Amino acid sequence: MLTGLGGVGKTQLAAEFSGRARASGEVDLLVWVAASSREAIVSAHARLAADVTGMEDPAPEQGAARLLQWLAANNRRWLVVIEDVQRPSDCGLRRLRPGRCW
């Protein structure tokens, strides 16, 4: 996880890292999520779950949970960037993060 004050270059660092990882073939799936609210994160996760599995869930929370299960269960290399989280505790982000965080 990368944290710090606004305006110090976290987004640029994440963009550079993810761009290099993608260009070199180090990741099979790269996702960039704007974290304006917990609902935005859940919605983005649910849409991605539908995209990668071809199955939509009746509720966004179910889709978000299914995405995290899918990420943990497959052998693909993935990178999920969740940008602009003001306070992870406010978003309930701990339950929405994939297994490994840097």
Image (cartoon, helix red, strand yellow):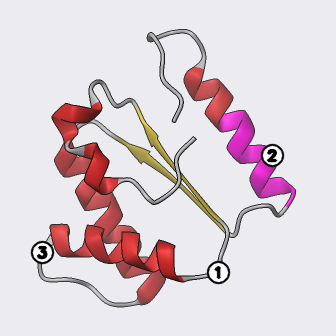
Above-or-below relation of 28 to 100: below
Q: Position of residue 77 (x, y in %)?
A: 67, 68
Q: Is residue 89 left or right of residue 12?
A: left
**Element type at marker 3?**
loop
- Residue at 17% x, 33% y is 90
Of mark 2 and mark 1, the one earlier in the sequence is 2
Part of the protein shown in magenta: 15-24
Mark 1: which amino acid?
Answer: Asn
Q: Dot 3 surroundings within 10 Å: few (below 14), some, or many (20 or more)?
A: few
Q: Secondary structure at mark 2?
A: helix
**Among numbered discs 1 and 3, the one appearing first in the sequence:** 3
User: Are the residues at dot 1 and dot 3 in contact (C-beta closer than 8 Å)?
Assistant: no
| Total marks in image | 3
Q: Are marks 2 and 3 in contact (CB under 8 Å)?
A: no
At label 3, which amino acid type do we have? Answer: Ala
- Which residue corresponds to mark 3? 59
Circle 2 residues within 10 Å: few <14, some 14–19, many ≥20: few
Between label 2 and label 1, give the one nearer the viewer: 1
- Give the residue drawn at x 73%, y 35%: 16
Viewer-nearest of labels 1 and 3? 1
Q: Would residue 100 appear left or right of 18 to someone viewing this image? A: left
Q: Main secondary structure of the magenta part?
A: helix
- For the residues labelled 2 and 3, the Cα–Cα distance comes to 34 Å
Residue holding disc 2:
20
